[in-house]
Amino acid sequence: MQFDVIIIGAGAAGMMCAAQAGARGRRVLLVDHAEKLGERIRISGGGRCNFTNRSVSADNYLSQNPHFCRSALARFTQHDFIAMLDKRRIAYHEREHGQLFCNDSAEEIIAMLRDACVDAGVRWAMPCAVQGVERLANDAALPWRVLTDQGTFRSESLVVATGGLAIPKIGASPFGYQLAEQFAIPVVPPRPALVPLALAPELLEPLKPMAGATLDASASFAMAAFRENVLITHRGLSGPAILQISSYWQMQEYGSGKKRPLEIDLLPGIDAGDWLEGQRQGRVHLPNLLAERLPRRFAHEWCALVGGDKAVNRPIGELGRRDLEHIASQLNAWSLMPAGTLGFAKAEVTLGGVSTAALSSKTMAARDVPGLYFIGEVVDVTGWLGGYNFQWAWSSGWVAGQFA
């Protein structure tokens, strides 16, 4: 019942950390309340796990301290994780934007990490519910005491890899944040990230005829912009570009001041004003012209929404210059104010978490609580869609495994 390291959370970060610490000769116990190992890995990427990305840098992450993740990402890179797959002979393929997926199944990643833990002598307590954590100031050798439904365990180091609040149906919980607060470690309020956005009823109603439309568009907010698919849904906005920009839109919750809308460029790479001006000599109607570049049903409904009946029923040459300027501005910067998100149930990951100001970027250890580490999604580091969050799990887990 005594160990060198206890790791709470047997997900991507936890298993990576356990395997590394065990390989150093540390006696490691991996504790998790779930019945299935690595469920988050198993369901990701449609069951094939988007395990990393060809191109990874700190620019692909959001945090109150955007530089915090640099050290871990540099010390265990995407190439290092790919080398693990190559050694295991796990076949993978690349999709758009450098995303890497298993050819066969995410189960191969889980098995690779599980076997690495077994080879390193890691012990498991799973399913095992943690009922409390104590730090004994009068015991320098084994200060950590973890009370569970399988008994009490003691250790020199404690690593928290409990994840965030996204996807509660597979067991997400606030345990890691509560543990941080128990030891006076600040937590940036968790919010859903990489999540579809909801629109208020008065804004959603005129968009209902467009529901189901998929657009090759660019979604932007502040200085961030992503060109991928945008999907109009019966509840608001979704699709990869919206999931990406949702994290940046959520970041404004941490500041003060009035919320701002996001913008969608329906004709990315095209100056809509110049393009429309070039069509003014013809007799084509605006919906038919837009249907050359946008889904036909969407083009018709959007013209009616933005330009009214005259934009639908008159040839483009009969529209006034001011009308065309308004339509052009909306084509390149259609402004929409979300009412919020669809919540943690629909979110890919969690924005916010254990404050990086309280952690060492070189070890992932809490600066003021000796022997306590936080890794993975529980930390205030949130990646883009496309394998970046798994890479943070591998990198932060690897780093903590060198020190815990």
Image (spheres, helix red, strand yellow):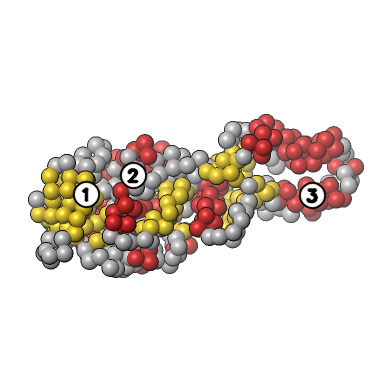
Where 355 sits versus 148, above or below? below
Residue that numbered label 3 is attached to: 326
Q: Position of residue 393 (x, y in %)?
A: 34, 54
| Front residue of 113 and 400 | 400
Which residue appears at 34% of the width and 38% of the height?
170
Q: Amino acid at mark 1?
A: Gly
Dot placed on the residue nearer the N-terminal end, 3 or 2: 2
Between 206 and 387, which is closer to the camera in this rendering? Answer: 206
Q: In the displayed structure, does residue 116 sit left or right of residue 287? A: left
The x, y position of residue 350, in whole percent, is 42, 49
Q: Secondary structure at mark 2?
A: loop
Looking at marks 1 and 3 on the same chain, the residue that comes earlier in the sequence is marked by: 1
Say which residue label 2 marks: 173
The residue singled out by tag 1 in the image is: 132
The reply to whether residue 103 is visible in this rendering is no
Distance between mark 3 and mark 2 Cα atoms: 47 Å
Using the rendered image of the protein, determine whether residue 224 is visible from the camera's viewpoint: yes
Binning the other alpha carbons within 10 Å of mark 1 as few (below 14), some (14 to 19) or many (20 upward) gives few
Name the disc covering residue 246, or none. Answer: none
Asked if the residue at tag 3 contacts the one at tag 1, i.e. Cβ–Cβ closer than 8 Å, the answer is no
Identify which residue is drawn at 22% across, 46% down: 130
List x then y, in percent, for residue 344: 44, 42
Residue at 59% across, 59% down: 257
Give the answer, above or below, for where 233 lies relative to 392: above
Q: Compare residues 197 and 256 and report the one nearer the observer.
A: 256
Residue type, numbered disc 3: His
Mark 3 secondary-structure assignment: helix
Q: Nearer the viewer, mark 1 or mark 3?
A: 1
Label 1 to label 2, Cα distance in Å? Answer: 14 Å
Give residue 308's quadrant in the image. Answer: top right
